[in-house]
Image (tube, grey):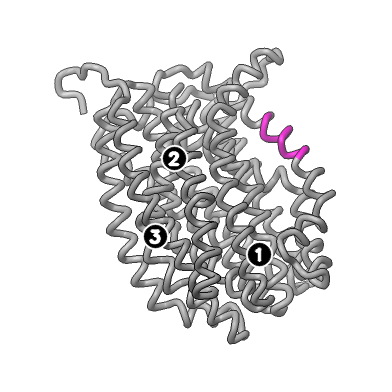
Amino acid sequence: MTSPSRAKLTHGPVSQRLRELTVPTIWGVFAMMTFNVVDTWFVGQLGTSELAAMSFTFPVVMTLVSVSIGLSAGTSSVLARAAGQDDHEQMQRLATDAIVLTMLITLALSLVGYLTIDPLFLLLGAPENLLPLIREYMVPWYAGLVLMLLPMVTMGSLRATGEASTAGRLLIASAVLNVIIDPLLIFGLAGFPRLELAGAAYATLIARAFIVVAALWVLHNRLNLITTSRVTLQRAWTSWRGILHVGLPAAGTNVIIPVANGVIVALVATYGPEAIAGLGIATRIEMFSLVIFFAMSGIIGPFVGQNLGAARRDRILLALKQCYIFCMALGAVVAIAVGAAALPVAELFSESAEAIEVATLYLWIVPLSYGAAGIVMLVNAAFNGLGQPLPATAISVTRMVIVYVPLAFAGRALFGIPGIFAAYAASNLLVGAGAAYWGWRVCSGAPQRELAPGEA
């Protein structure tokens, strides 16, 4: 085993480093999005009730995933800053302790989640006749939760060291595996049992298990970032405190979004299961449409973290400027493309006219704000990379709780479902502008060391 080389992101042209990180991450995130898109398409073939049941699980699943995103952000932030300082021993301790911490948190979440399935989904507005289908999906999901959450932390560790291409390849391989297994377990093909909704959950578990095994092998054998040396609880707590300093607010930031979306699901549920099915189709297509924005938010944190550790404020500001411009240009292109393809794509997922109408309406309105939403994701990730997660939390609370939810209630009262969707677009646009300014101002205060002659 060898130690990682010098921090990869603190030298060389900024635009080149961003491309080198973003391109493989795009393919990795694209692959992960297929988990949801493929699952939704196959489940849609089972019927509207199954699709509606799966749509009700989405806010809960995303809340749990948000916990792992927070832990991943915390791990990535402290690891990237240690990499920028060329402190390999600290990187080993942080990477190892992050894995242990994730497993401990996952055990607690699994137990609580399993015991609260019925009351939680009733609170979200699920009708009692859908509860058996919801349990069918969520029971295996909770049973294998460690396999769902741990991949996010290991991928964050890889990206923090500049190994975005490795993370991308693992995610692609996992997605291909999921596509192969999904129809076998959902429909009982090739001698496999017909598990329907549970089959979708088991297929995802198997695919995520592949990521866990492969990522741990890379971290241990190639990067020498997993240590088996004895450690005291005090030393582990030091690592956990550093991770949780960013991880807890980052998890809260990410949990805010699905929790607020849960309120929106409850609002849309008043229009019937077909409307919920349409919303489920649209939100999964939306995730697919935002893949480049997700990729950029996944790499800007490690980039900022490494350059903060190396005291390179100039590189941080240049990266933000380039990313802001790119987000707005890409947002315009994606809005046009999604709007044009909304109807035929929605028809691929359901035969219900009402579900198709709701999905299409969402995809005509909300994508107008995708550029601003991308900037919000980018700035939040940059704050985490700086080790300052509270501004990111404030931005998300403002966008989802202070602006979006009240506007959604007002929009529904005035315009029905279109008003709910328009509220989302408005919250993205308003808060995106403020986030761009705040992120630039804070990053302008980052440390800057004196550069050596000819240093890039």
**Residue for point 42% across, 74% down:** 364
Residue 192 seen in this snapshot: no
Examine the residues drawn in magenta and state their main secondary structure. helix
What is the x, y in percent for residue 240? 62, 24
Which of the numbered marks, if any, corresponds to residue 381?
Answer: 2
Quadrant into which the N terminus falls: top right
In the rendered structure, the answer to whether residue 305 lies left or right of residue 156 reads left
Q: Earlier in the sequence, mark 2 or mark 3?
A: 3
Closest to the observer: 400 or 231? 400
What is the x, y in percent for residue 294? 45, 51
Q: Earlier in the sequence, mark 1 or mark 2?
A: 1
Q: Earlier in the sequence, mark 3 or mark 1?
A: 1
Above or below for 294 versus 351: above
Secondary structure found at label 3: helix
**Crowding at label 1, few (<14), some or many (≥20) Cα neighbours within 10 Å?**
some
Q: Which residue is mark 1?
A: 266
What is the x, y in percent for residue 307? 34, 27
Residues drawn in magenta: 101-108
- In magenta stretch: residue 137: no
What is the x, y in percent for residue 32? 55, 56
Which of the numbered marks, if any, corresponds to residue 370?
Answer: 3
Residue type, numbered disc 3: Tyr
Instruction: Give the Cα separation between the discs numbered 3 and 1.
Output: 23 Å
Residue type, numbered disc 2: Ala
Secondary structure found at label 2: helix
**Residue for point 81% across, 56% down:** 119
Instruction: Give the Cα separation between the discs numbered 2 and 3.
Output: 17 Å
Secondary structure found at label 1: helix
Residue type, numbered disc 1: Ala
